[in-house]
Image (cartoon, helix red, strand yellow):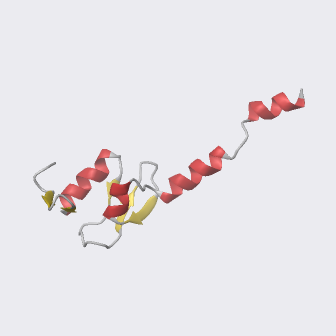
Amino acid sequence: MDQETKMVDKKYVFHTIDSIKELFAKYEYILVSTEYVPGVKLQFICDKNHEGSMTIGGFVKGNRCIKCGIETIRNLNKTPFNDIMDLED
């Protein structure tokens, strides 16, 4: 745990804007917000250049860019072209 993030009662973690920026950077996200207010959504740009917002709690829980999530689901529902060609034979 870095010096800027402090653990209290082993349950709550208090973040600073610098520790949040560092966390986002680990996932190749750019933190656009310049101020951290607990419970307020942070503005970011994901690794695929989508703009979005979420709370630090959501990010820590594993939530990521909603637009990337939608693209992933769309791609899962698509049938690959080669599979379609195999059906015609």
Q: Nearer the viewer, residue 34 or 27?
A: 27
Is 3 drawn above or below residue 15 in the view shown? above
Residue 46 image point, x, y percent:
41, 53
Quarter holding residue 60: bottom left
User: In the displayed structure, does residue 35 sit left or right of residue 8?
Assistant: right
Residue 22 image point, x, y percent:
24, 51
Residue plotted at (64% across, 50% down): 74
Residue plotted at (82% across, 31% down): 85
Q: How many marks?
A: 0
Residue plotted at (72% across, 36% down): 80
Residue 56 image point, x, y percent:
31, 62
Residue at the far right in the pictured view: 89
Quarter holding residue 31: bottom left
Image quadrant occupied by the C terminus: top right
User: In the displayed structure, does residue 22 sit left or right of residue 44?
Assistant: left
Residue 37 image point, x, y percent:
25, 73
Residue plotted at (36% across, 65% down): 43
Quarter holding residue 39: bottom left
